[in-house]
Amino acid sequence: MSRKVRLALLLPGLILLLFTSGCWSSKEIEDLSVYVGLGIDVAKETEFEKSVNEQGGHYPKRNNITATVQIVPKGSSKEESQQGSPGAGKSYFNEQLTGDSVIQIFRQFSLRRDRPLIGHHLKVIVVSSEVARKFRLDQLLDFVLRDNDIRPSCLVVVSDRRALDALTSNDPSEIPSFYLTGLVDNVYRTNKILPPVSLAKLDATMQSGSSYLLQNVISYEGEHKFSGAAIFSGKTNRWIGSLNQTDMEGLSWVQGKAKGGVVKTYTHKDGSTITYEIKHIKSKIIPTVKGDDISFHVQIESDGWFMENWTAPEAHGSEHYLDGLEKDFGHMAEQQVDQLLHKMQDVYKVDAAGFGDKLRIKYPRVWKKIKNNWDETFSEIPITYDIKVKITNQGSSTE
């Protein structure tokens, strides 16, 4: 092969390499601060901030919020945090700054860290109920909704206390942001966990003007638990109250979205504990319009297993006996639904269960007339329901 031919073959390859140099202008991950959690609280300056302000490190701002970023040090990962060894040091650290603009707070971190923040791996956003009462949620999250670096799939939850508490753990091998997102995976074991609300889903809900729920987190000395849900008004996008765990069970019956859970009640004869494990729930919300009158009827069906019986001696599982148990479990489910509807219609006067969506789909013209004042209208609408519980399995038995 002649020299000219070899050069002719090499030249296209050299040109191709020039245009496929890929990451020549990007920053290596080791040169960035990867944050996996973001917390937003009512303003409370840290001692560091107070000290640097006295030294002239202040800039023009109002102290509206304190933002916490949870940073994973170089070399840390979810797997490494789960397999952390004693004395290995913390798998994360939290940094806080106070101000009135989330993006400006993020840029201020560049004045105290040699590696800039990167939000590509943000897993969870925690908003305290206190700051959500004071400011609109769409205001607090405006920056993260606009920022292309942040994944719209990240989870959004509410902390009953400070968001910082929910992002703090007493286990040095645990990364709280991963822990919180992992709890959502237990939804198939209990009907007390909301289906996860991502940043993208929350954005669409806020724009719709409908009232909505976010998973609530409670904390104590570095330990955390999902408990109930925070209620947000569709008109104001502010926190207005909360549902407890029993309300969440009632919500699962109405919406029919539960993948698991238990119903516990007590026998009439001696007060012994009996427990039903939910395997399936099917629900249908049926709106009816007659003239100016609107009503709803909810048809709920569930099948599951009779899994615990504290009666002594245990009664035999005859058909008559099982029919009685099904009625007892159904009555307990009715109490849970009653409590939920009372909270929504009489206490908070908002529809956070999706009744309005069913009306909109079946009666679009009616919905168009009343949608602007739906929450107020909903609080006056009669709602009936029936619940049918079926025991399909009694588990293993010594009888």
Image: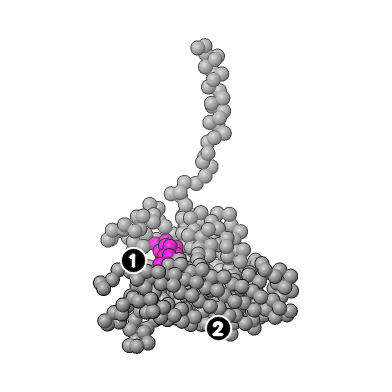
Residue that label 1 marks: 171
Please state the horizontal and vertical placement of residue 10, each as a whole percent of the image: 53, 22
Residue 375 is drawn in which quadrant? bottom right
Q: Position of residue 59 (x, y in %)?
A: 57, 66
Residue under pointer 2? 342
The amino acid marked with disc number 1 is Asp
Give me the residue at 58% from left, 54% from top. Answer: 148
Q: Is residue 111 visible?
A: no
In the image, the segment drawn in magenta is: 175-189
Residue at x-position 28% and y-position 58%: 85
Residue 132, image x, y percentages: 56, 74
* Between discs 2 and 1, the one toward the N terminus: 1
Q: Nearer the viewer, mark 2 or mark 1?
A: 2
Decide which of 357, 271 is in the foreground and name it: 271
* SS state under label 2: helix
Residue neighbourhood size for the residue with mark 1, other residues' Cα within 10 Å, grouped as few (<14), some (14–19), many (≥20): some
Q: 232 or 305: which is nearer to us?
A: 305
- Distance of label 2 from label 1 (alpha carbons): 40 Å
Classify mark 1: helix, strand or loop: loop
Residue ID at (39%, 54%): 77
Direction front: furthest residue: 319
Task: Establish if 271 lies above or below 392.
Answer: below
- Colour setting: one colour
| Circle 2 residues within 10 Å: few <14, some 14–19, many ≥20 | some
Q: Is residue 340 left or right of residue 320?
A: right
Which residue is at a point 71% across and 68% down the rendered structure image? 364
Closer-to-camera residue (242/307) = 307
Mark 2 residue type: His
Asked whether, in this view, residue 394 is left or right of residue 153, the answer is left
User: Does the rendering let one see residue 390?
Assistant: yes
Q: Is 188 one of the magenta-colored residues?
A: yes
